[in-house]
Amino acid sequence: MNQTLRRSLSTAVCIALCTVLPMAFHAIPNGGVLFSPMHLPVLLCGIVTAWPFGLLCGISGPLLSFLLTGMPGAPMLPQMMVELGVYGFVSGLMMQLVKTRNSMAKVFTSLVTAMLMGRIAAGAARAFIFARGSYSFPAWVTSYFVSCFPAIVMQLVLIPLVYLALEKSGFLGSEMR
């Protein structure tokens, strides 16, 4: 299978997961906030495909989910598109920029950088555009680090494991690493 087709299909699956995973996690009380299920496929997409595909997934995943399920809610949609767009872009870009033979070091570096940059971008967008004048630093820390701490842990554990499984299966091939 050629590289562009493989990346396109992987992106389509990740965009679909942006709709399916939130429906499953929202069955758990406060599951959307606690586990941030849409973040998983977007971060994975950027890491596995490349930054353009990750960016596409990060922007279109929440939009498609909103159109099909109403999640995220309309007030949260723009800031989630910013956050997840940055996740997909930065995770894919970092996979290109980090030069090491250790794939797990590359994945963790890309993942942590993307998670920080996405949270900073979303907080800035919220403070300066979407909730101008009514958003504080403590509110940002609480909403992007404290209340979603289980999601952060889950992302740092599951995404490297999925990447490792894809690598071992040969799915990634040398052209996608």
Image (cartoon, rainbow, N blue to C red):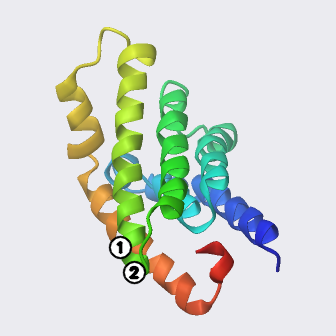
Is residue 139 or residue 10 the one in the foreground? Answer: 10
Extreme residue toward the front, this view: 99
* Residue 104 as seen in the image, left or right of residue 40: left
Image disc number at residue 102: 2
Q: Residue tagged by mark 1? A: 105
Q: Position of residue 154 (x, y in %)?
A: 33, 65
Q: Residue at x 17, y 28 (%)?
A: 138
For the residue marked with disc 1, what is the amino acid?
Ala
User: Is any part of residue 150 visible from this angle?
Assistant: yes
Image disc number at residue 71: none
| Cβ atoms under marks 1 and 2 closer than 8 Å | yes
Q: Is residue 5 above or below residue 73?
A: below
Q: Is residue 159 above or below residue 70?
A: below
Q: What is the C-alpha distance between the residues marked 1 and 2? A: 5 Å
Q: Position of residue 177 (x, y in %)?
A: 58, 75
Instruction: Tell me the element at label 2.
Output: loop
Q: Which quadrant of the figure contains the N terminus?
A: bottom right
